[in-house]
Image: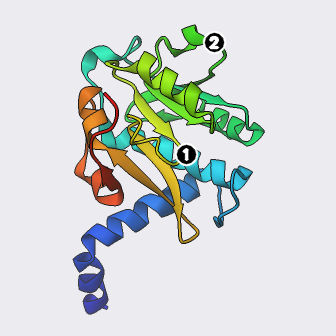
Protein backbone atom coordinates (compact mmCIF):
# COMPACT_ATOMS: atom_id res chain seq x y z
CA UNK A 1 0.00 0.00 0.00
CA UNK A 2 2.88 2.34 0.78
CA UNK A 3 4.28 1.76 -2.74
CA UNK A 4 0.95 2.75 -4.30
CA UNK A 5 0.95 5.98 -2.31
CA UNK A 6 4.48 6.84 -3.40
CA UNK A 7 3.66 6.12 -7.05
CA UNK A 8 0.61 8.38 -6.96
CA UNK A 9 2.66 11.08 -5.28
CA UNK A 10 5.28 10.83 -8.02
CA UNK A 11 2.71 11.61 -10.69
CA UNK A 12 2.16 15.11 -9.23
CA UNK A 13 1.54 17.11 -12.41
CA UNK A 14 -0.75 14.55 -13.98
CA UNK A 15 -2.47 13.97 -10.65
CA UNK A 16 -3.30 17.68 -10.24
CA UNK A 17 -4.74 17.80 -13.75
CA UNK A 18 -6.87 14.74 -13.14
CA UNK A 19 -8.06 16.08 -9.78
CA UNK A 20 -9.03 19.42 -11.37
CA UNK A 21 -11.04 17.72 -14.11
CA UNK A 22 -12.73 15.26 -11.75
CA UNK A 23 -13.56 18.05 -9.34
CA UNK A 24 -15.12 20.11 -12.17
CA UNK A 25 -17.33 17.21 -13.08
CA UNK A 26 -18.34 16.49 -9.48
CA UNK A 27 -19.20 20.10 -8.65
CA UNK A 28 -21.80 20.31 -11.37
CA UNK A 29 -23.11 16.77 -11.04
CA UNK A 30 -21.78 15.59 -14.37
CA UNK A 31 -21.22 11.83 -14.39
CA UNK A 32 -19.52 11.48 -17.74
CA UNK A 33 -18.55 13.70 -20.64
CA UNK A 34 -18.52 12.95 -24.31
CA UNK A 35 -17.88 15.03 -27.39
CA UNK A 36 -21.27 16.24 -28.54
CA UNK A 37 -20.72 19.69 -30.03
CA UNK A 38 -22.68 22.42 -28.24
CA UNK A 39 -24.56 19.94 -26.07
CA UNK A 40 -25.93 20.68 -22.64
CA UNK A 41 -23.41 18.29 -21.12
CA UNK A 42 -20.54 20.06 -22.84
CA UNK A 43 -21.70 23.41 -21.46
CA UNK A 44 -21.96 21.89 -17.96
CA UNK A 45 -18.33 20.82 -18.21
CA UNK A 46 -17.31 24.26 -19.51
CA UNK A 47 -19.17 25.92 -16.63
CA UNK A 48 -17.20 23.71 -14.25
CA UNK A 49 -13.95 24.73 -15.85
CA UNK A 50 -14.88 28.43 -15.71
CA UNK A 51 -15.75 28.04 -12.03
CA UNK A 52 -12.33 26.52 -11.41
CA UNK A 53 -10.46 29.07 -13.54
CA UNK A 54 -11.36 31.67 -10.91
CA UNK A 55 -9.21 29.80 -8.38
CA UNK A 56 -6.17 29.98 -10.63
CA UNK A 57 -6.42 33.59 -11.82
CA UNK A 58 -5.40 36.62 -9.80
CA UNK A 59 -6.99 39.94 -10.76
CA UNK A 60 -5.53 43.30 -9.73
CA UNK A 61 -7.27 44.60 -6.57
CA UNK A 62 -8.97 47.46 -8.44
CA UNK A 63 -10.61 45.06 -10.96
CA UNK A 64 -13.67 44.47 -8.80
CA UNK A 65 -16.53 46.92 -8.36
CA UNK A 66 -17.56 44.87 -5.32
CA UNK A 67 -14.69 43.07 -3.56
CA UNK A 68 -17.05 40.29 -2.51
CA UNK A 69 -18.33 39.52 -6.02
CA UNK A 70 -16.99 38.09 -9.28
CA UNK A 71 -19.16 38.97 -12.26
CA UNK A 72 -19.36 36.38 -15.04
CA UNK A 73 -20.87 37.79 -18.23
CA UNK A 74 -21.64 35.67 -21.27
CA UNK A 75 -22.82 36.19 -24.83
CA UNK A 76 -24.48 33.23 -26.47
CA UNK A 77 -27.45 32.38 -28.60
CA UNK A 78 -27.20 28.71 -27.66
CA UNK A 79 -29.87 27.74 -25.10
CA UNK A 80 -27.50 25.22 -23.49
CA UNK A 81 -25.23 28.08 -22.37
CA UNK A 82 -27.89 29.12 -19.84
CA UNK A 83 -26.41 26.39 -17.61
CA UNK A 84 -23.93 29.13 -16.64
CA UNK A 85 -26.71 30.58 -14.49
CA UNK A 86 -26.18 27.53 -12.24
CA UNK A 87 -22.99 29.28 -11.08
CA UNK A 88 -25.02 32.22 -9.75
CA UNK A 89 -24.36 32.75 -6.01
CA UNK A 90 -21.70 30.01 -5.82
CA UNK A 91 -18.71 31.01 -3.70
CA UNK A 92 -15.18 30.67 -5.04
CA UNK A 93 -12.02 32.13 -3.54
CA UNK A 94 -14.16 33.95 -0.98
CA UNK A 95 -16.24 35.75 -3.61
CA UNK A 96 -19.82 35.18 -4.73
CA UNK A 97 -20.35 34.69 -8.46
CA UNK A 98 -22.96 36.80 -10.22
CA UNK A 99 -23.91 35.65 -13.74
CA UNK A 100 -25.19 38.11 -16.35
CA UNK A 101 -26.23 37.50 -19.94
CA UNK A 102 -24.87 40.02 -22.43
CA UNK A 103 -27.64 41.94 -24.20
CA UNK A 104 -26.00 45.17 -25.39
CA UNK A 105 -22.67 47.01 -25.42
CA UNK A 106 -23.14 48.41 -21.90
CA UNK A 107 -23.43 44.90 -20.46
CA UNK A 108 -19.65 44.57 -20.12
CA UNK A 109 -19.49 47.10 -17.28
CA UNK A 110 -18.41 45.37 -14.10
CA UNK A 111 -17.55 42.06 -15.80
CA UNK A 112 -14.57 40.14 -14.45
CA UNK A 113 -15.04 37.16 -16.78
CA UNK A 114 -16.58 37.27 -20.25
CA UNK A 115 -17.52 33.99 -21.94
CA UNK A 116 -18.12 34.01 -25.70
CA UNK A 117 -20.54 31.18 -26.48
CA UNK A 118 -20.83 32.17 -30.11
CA UNK A 119 -19.19 31.43 -33.44
CA UNK A 120 -19.74 34.98 -34.76
CA UNK A 121 -16.11 36.03 -35.36
CA UNK A 122 -16.99 39.65 -36.20
CA UNK A 123 -18.86 40.00 -32.89
CA UNK A 124 -16.00 38.36 -30.99
CA UNK A 125 -13.34 40.56 -32.60
CA UNK A 126 -15.31 43.73 -31.85
CA UNK A 127 -15.96 42.77 -28.22
CA UNK A 128 -12.29 41.83 -27.71
CA UNK A 129 -11.36 45.30 -28.99
CA UNK A 130 -13.92 46.84 -26.60
CA UNK A 131 -12.55 44.81 -23.68
CA UNK A 132 -8.90 45.57 -24.50
CA UNK A 133 -6.85 46.98 -21.61
CA UNK A 134 -9.48 45.90 -19.07
CA UNK A 135 -8.93 43.33 -16.33
CA UNK A 136 -11.38 40.82 -17.81
CA UNK A 137 -10.71 37.10 -18.24
CA UNK A 138 -12.01 36.37 -21.74
CA UNK A 139 -13.03 32.78 -22.49
CA UNK A 140 -14.12 31.44 -25.89
CA UNK A 141 -14.88 28.25 -27.72
CA UNK A 142 -14.04 28.74 -31.39
CA UNK A 143 -10.91 27.99 -33.35
CA UNK A 144 -8.62 31.02 -33.40
CA UNK A 145 -10.10 32.73 -30.31
CA UNK A 146 -6.76 32.87 -28.48
CA UNK A 147 -5.00 34.09 -31.63
CA UNK A 148 -7.59 36.91 -31.85
CA UNK A 149 -6.50 38.07 -28.40
CA UNK A 150 -8.81 36.04 -26.17
CA UNK A 151 -7.21 34.63 -23.02
CA UNK A 152 -8.66 31.11 -22.64
CA UNK A 153 -10.15 29.02 -25.43
CA UNK A 154 -11.87 25.64 -25.20
CA UNK A 155 -11.25 23.07 -27.93
CA UNK A 156 -11.85 19.39 -28.52
CA UNK A 157 -8.93 17.01 -28.95
CA UNK A 158 -9.48 13.27 -29.36
CA UNK A 159 -13.01 13.61 -27.96
CA UNK A 160 -11.72 15.43 -24.88
CA UNK A 161 -12.39 19.01 -23.87
CA UNK A 162 -9.14 20.93 -23.47
CA UNK A 163 -8.19 24.59 -23.30
CA UNK A 164 -5.46 26.87 -24.52
CA UNK A 165 -4.23 30.07 -22.93
CA UNK A 166 -2.86 33.18 -24.60
CA UNK A 167 -0.32 34.25 -21.96
CA UNK A 168 0.38 37.58 -23.69
CA UNK A 169 -3.33 38.49 -23.64
CA UNK A 170 -3.48 37.58 -19.93
CA UNK A 171 -0.46 39.76 -19.21
CA UNK A 172 -2.01 42.71 -21.10
CA UNK A 173 -5.18 42.31 -19.03
CA UNK A 174 -2.96 42.33 -15.90
CA UNK A 175 -4.19 38.88 -14.90
CA UNK A 176 -1.77 36.51 -13.19
CA UNK A 177 -2.31 32.85 -14.03
CA UNK A 178 -1.07 30.24 -11.59
CA UNK A 179 1.27 27.47 -12.65
CA UNK A 180 -1.52 24.89 -12.03
CA UNK A 181 -3.69 26.31 -14.81
CA UNK A 182 -0.73 26.84 -17.15
CA UNK A 183 0.39 23.21 -16.73
CA UNK A 184 -3.05 22.02 -17.84
CA UNK A 185 -3.22 24.26 -20.91
CA UNK A 186 -1.77 24.50 -24.35
CA UNK A 187 0.12 27.81 -24.43
CA UNK A 188 -0.46 30.40 -27.17
CA UNK A 189 1.58 33.58 -27.49
CA UNK A 190 0.86 36.74 -29.40
CA UNK A 191 -2.33 37.51 -31.24
CA UNK A 192 -3.84 40.71 -32.53
CA UNK A 193 -2.81 43.95 -30.91
Question: The C terminus is located in which quarter?
Answer: top left
Pick the front one: 123 or 41: 123
Pick the front one: 94 or 167: 167
Outermost residue on the right side: it is: 79
Circle 1 is placed at which residue position? 142
Horizontal and vertical percent position of residue 140: 51, 40
Say which element carries label 1.
Answer: loop
* Residue 25 makes an appearance in the image: yes
Image: 91 above or below 167: above
Image: 78 above or below 126: below
Mark 2 vs mark 1: in front: 1
In this rendering, the count of numbered labels is 2
- Give the residue displayed 62% in from the left and 39% down from the top: 119
Circle 2 is placed at which residue position? 104
Q: Who comes first in sequence, dot 2 or dot 1?
A: 2
Q: Residues within 10 Å of mark 2 (few under 14, many from 20)?
A: few
Amino acid sequence: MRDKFQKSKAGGKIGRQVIMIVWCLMVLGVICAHAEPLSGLEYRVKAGFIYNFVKFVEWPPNAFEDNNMIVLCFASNNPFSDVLFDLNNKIVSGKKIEVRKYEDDNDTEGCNIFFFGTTDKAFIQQRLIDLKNRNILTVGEIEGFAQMGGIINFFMEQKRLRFEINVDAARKAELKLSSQILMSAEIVKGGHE
